[in-house]
Amino acid sequence: MSDLILVLNCGSSSIKFALFDTGAQPLPRQPLWNGKVDGITGPAPTFGETGVAPGPVALDAAHPYNAALQHIRARVLERVAQGGHRIAAVAHRVVHGGAKYFDPVRVDAAVLADLKTYIPLAPLHQPFALEAIETLLATAPGLPQVACFDTAFHHTLPDVEKMLPLPYDAWERGLRRYGFHGLSYEFMSVALAERHGDAARGRTIVAHLGSGASLCAMQGLRSVATTMGFSALDGLMMGTRCGALDPGAVLYLMEIEKLTLAQVGHVLYHESGLLGLSGVSSDPRVLLQQEAGNERVQAALALYVRRIVREIGAMTAVLGGLNMLVFTAGIGEHNAAIRERICRELAFLGVALDADANALNAPVISPAASRVQVAVEPTNEEWIAAWRTLALVGLPGQ
């Protein structure tokens, strides 16, 4: 019988899960089995898993999120029993740990209550992971649960990077730049050291480009600056999120155009970015196919790339130079055209691309003569959560 770590990554409309076998040492990077319930709040939710293509799944319309959790739980228990395994612990990706939680923590009722106080800091993300934790505390109270925080990796940011230029009592109340995508960046700190050694410990910028997107400037593989701030709305332009925006534009939408707070929030989170500008899609793959002759699509892609290039320039200034640029997450790992456009604009820094390596999504996509090494490194947030959970709970297999 093998002990398994179940990792749950709960988003606003999807729940991803992965199971890692602690019997193998070191912990395998690839899960034994994984899957996803998608479109939870939409009209046609789907469920897919290893070896099974996504297909329709029936969810209780009144409580679709809880129904999705119960569907995953039933399927996991069935598969685990078939394989003669047992769930030894559950790791949860929790978006916000505030200024208190810098390391994974075992969750009990008191910790859960504490984490609920951070819901106002991440209202579109925090509640879903906590609902899963609360459900498991009620139905499997003896099962160890560990919260792994997306904000934790950035606790090494200096105060000058954390502060917002608001009255000082805002800082004292917790209004500060926290940074996100921390599990992805923590995995990068492990994987880059393994692949590139000391070269990765210099002045490195990691570009996490997915539906959500951010940059992290690292020195010694520790976070020293990042583009997301108080919320996951800040920084780079994203698939449906606006990224950094003049607050005056928000005031205008509310005061002059009379949008409610809820309407403004919906626009900024769900109707902006690539989707909002292009009017076509939030996916660069789709936009690249429709770019010719479509001025809105051209404008959307141009601004998307410009925002990334501008922020890489700012991060380079903070670092005092740049030794390595790393692309990760869905777009960063797989979209050679977007990488090429970004790197073309960074030639002044000494960034160069090997076109053939870039087309292959190779681990290193810059030629030897490039002053800046350019790399592609797949992220693995689920593994880092499982790995940290092993260390905390004390199971064999680390």
Image: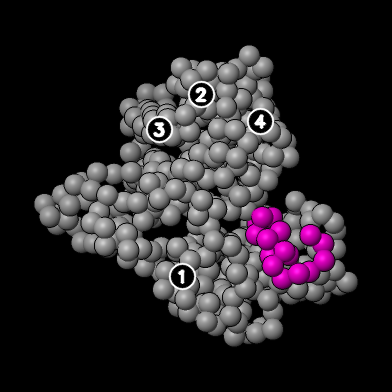
* Spot occupied by residue 354 in the image (x, y as percentages of width and height): 63, 18
Q: Compare marks 1 and 4 and give the one earlier in the sequence.
A: 1
Magenta region, residue range: 382-398
| Whole-number angstrom distance, CA of label 2 to CA of label 1 | 38 Å
As drawn, the residue found furthest toward the right would be 1
Q: Compare marks 4 and 2 and give the one earlier in the sequence.
A: 4
| Whole-number angstrom distance, CA of label 4 to CA of label 2 | 19 Å
The magenta stretch spans residue 334:
no
Q: Which residue is mark 1?
A: 127
Is residue 39 visible in the rendered image? The answer is: no
| Nearer the camera: disc 4 or disc 2 | 4
Asked whether 211 or 306 is in front, the reply is 306
Q: Please, what is the three-letter code of the amino acid marked with disc 1?
A: Pro
229, above or below 312, in the image? below
Q: Compare marks 2 and 3 and give the one earlier in the sequence.
A: 3
Q: Are marks 4 and 3 in contact (CB under 8 Å)?
A: no
> In the structure shown, which secondary structural element does the residue marked by tag 4 occupy?
helix
* Spot occupied by residue 264 in the image (x, y as percentages of width and height): 26, 56
* Spot occupied by residue 200 in the image (x, y as percentages of width and height): 64, 34
Residue 199 disc label: 4
Dot 2 crowding, Cα within 10 Å, few <14, some 14–19, many 20+: many
Q: Which residue is mark 2?
A: 343
Dot 3 crowding, Cα within 10 Å, few <14, some 14–19, many 20+: some
> In the structure shown, which secondary structural element does the residue marked by tag 1 occupy?
helix
Q: Residue at image x 88%, y 71%?
A: 1
Q: Residue at image x 79%, y 59%?
A: 398
